[in-house]
Image: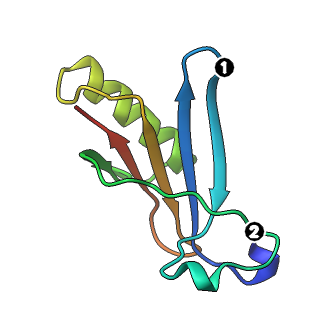
Amino acid sequence: MRLQKIRDLVAVFTCQPRAGWSAVFGYRLDDPDDLEIGDSMIRVGERYAARFVPDGPSPDLYKDLWRQVEMAEKEGAITRAYTQEVAVIPERGEPELYISVI
């Protein structure tokens, strides 16, 4: 996708009870008419989500984000809905992770 000049990526993770987790990587699209030929579109619905950002320097920012999610869940700070989880992966800057909550 970076070769196609797509700079900011989005990963959408979904959990299927029988199959486990799957992920789709793509880019944000403001207008469906801008969809490139050959690309597919998924919609991320509006819902409540907890936002996570890196909490300091780390050799693996994404591992850090998921660790934060695990800790927040263990501490009872969030109750995960296990629907769509969204990671925003910018070319520059810090990633963001949105975890669906109930």
Q: Quadrant of residue 39?
A: bottom right
Distance from disc 1 to disc 2, alpha carbons, whole Å, reads 24 Å
Neighbor class of circle 2 (other Cα within 10 Å; few <14, some 14-19, many 20+) is: few
Q: Is residue 51 above or below residue 77?
A: below
Quadrant in which the C terminus is drawn: top left
Classed neighbour count for the residue bearing mark 1: other residues with Cα under 10 Å, few (<14), some (14–19), many (≥20): few
First in sequence, mark 1 or 2: give its number.
1
State the residue position of label 2: 39
Report the residue at 22% width, 30% height from top: 78
What residue do we see at 41% from left, 28% from top? Answer: 82
Above or below residue 99? Residue 29 is below
Residue in front for this viewpoint, 16 or 69: 16
**51 sits to left or right of 93:** left
Disc 1 secondary structure class = loop
- Farthest residue, direction left: 77
Residue pictured at 45% horizontal, 43% vertical: 85
User: Picture coordinates of residue 25 (x, y %)?
Assistant: 66, 56
Q: Is residue 46 left or right of residue 8?
A: left
Q: Nearer the viewer, residue 29 or 70?
A: 29
Residue type, mark 1 in image: Ala
Q: Which quadrant, please, contains the N terminus?
A: bottom right
